[in-house]
Image: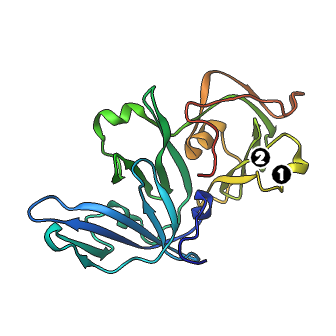
Amino acid sequence: MIDDEELFVTDLIGKQLMRVTTAWHRYADAEPSLLHLWLHLEGLDPVLFHTPGTGLLLRVDQPHRPYAMVEHGEVSVIDDSPDVLLTQFVGQPIRSVREIGYDDGRVNFTAGLTLQFPSGSIRLLGLDDDLVIAHDQDLGAVEAHLHEDLTLARVVQTCGGCPSQWDVWYLYLRYRHGEGTVEQHPSEDTDTWDGEESSLWTSWDDGTNGGSIELADFLAMAGLRLAPDAEVHTAGRPEGLSMRRTSSAGAPSRP
């Protein structure tokens, strides 16, 4: 990969976090502000996360060197700072990536991402020109406008044994050998599933090498949920692949 190459969020799934680099603006006695974040992932060049004002952008880019801003302070660049929440996940693979939407009734946009690791998750957000790393803390009033779950209105189980699998309005959910995946496809026609419009949305390995899982457990791992009036059909029912999906955040998509 070359510098400035744009990435899809699905490019991060399954990659082990090797190092975390952060750039901070420091000025006088003010609290340092986070300017840039780089994740060093196995098999990828450094991935830069930054905000254009609202939302996140990510691309391949090498960390820059520290520099002075004359009367406006300085920018320091630090590897694996213990003060950066992400460093606790160094050595672990990214199990899944979920988009975080913002909607206050007037504007809506993709505000950031949730990265899921085997031992926990972290949120990366771009809000009001600030790059925010949040673990389990409440961010205040903005939390009411953030959402990341996809609501499923109809689910048809196509295999009840091993592997466990379901079809959900062109989302294909599969669990086998302890590995769970959610794939997004453009239509119910499986002949279209190898095209550019198809993508891996979520992937993880729970370490059990199991072959079956309950739907509720699968959805919890994948960041999905059922609508209150959702239709759920178990394996062996005659229904086909015509399914509905509702979502306040929209369909899972590439940024």
Residue neighbourhood size for the residue with mark 2, other residues' Cα within 10 Å, grouped as few (<14), some (14–19), many (≥20): many
Q: Which residue lies furthest to the left in this view?
A: 29
- The answer to whether the residue labelled 1 contacts the one labelled 2, judged by CB atoms less than 8 Å apart, is yes
Q: Residue furthest top?
A: 229
Amino acid bearing label 1: Trp
Of the numbered discs in the image, which one, if any, rests on residue 10? none
- Quadrant of the rendered structure where residue 2 is? bottom right
Q: Where is residue 126 in the image (x, y as percent from the top left)?
A: 40, 50
Amino acid bearing label 2: His
| Left or right for 25, reference 100 | left
Residue neighbourhood size for the residue with mark 1, other residues' Cα within 10 Å, grouped as few (<14), some (14–19), many (≥20): some
Name the image quarter holding the N terminus.
Answer: bottom right
Q: Position of residue 103 (x, y in %)?
A: 46, 32
The residue to which callout 1 is attached is 193
The residue to which callout 2 is attached is 185
Residue in the picture at 49% in, 35% down = 108
Residue 158 versus residue 61 in the image, above or below = above
- Quadrant of the rendered structure where residue 165 is? top right
Residue in the picture at 29% in, 61% down = 34
Q: Which residue lies furthest to the front in this view?
A: 71
Residue in the picture at 37% in, 78% down = 64
Q: Position of residue 212 (x, y in %)?
A: 71, 47
| Left or right for 222, reference 147 | right
Residue in the picture at 42% in, 29% down = 104
Residue 31 versus residue 234 in the image, above or below = below
Q: Position of residue 24 (x, y in %)?
A: 26, 67
Q: Distance between the residues labelled 1 and 2?
A: 6 Å
Q: Earlier in the sequence, mark 1 or mark 2?
A: 2
> In the rendered image, is residue 205 in sight?
no
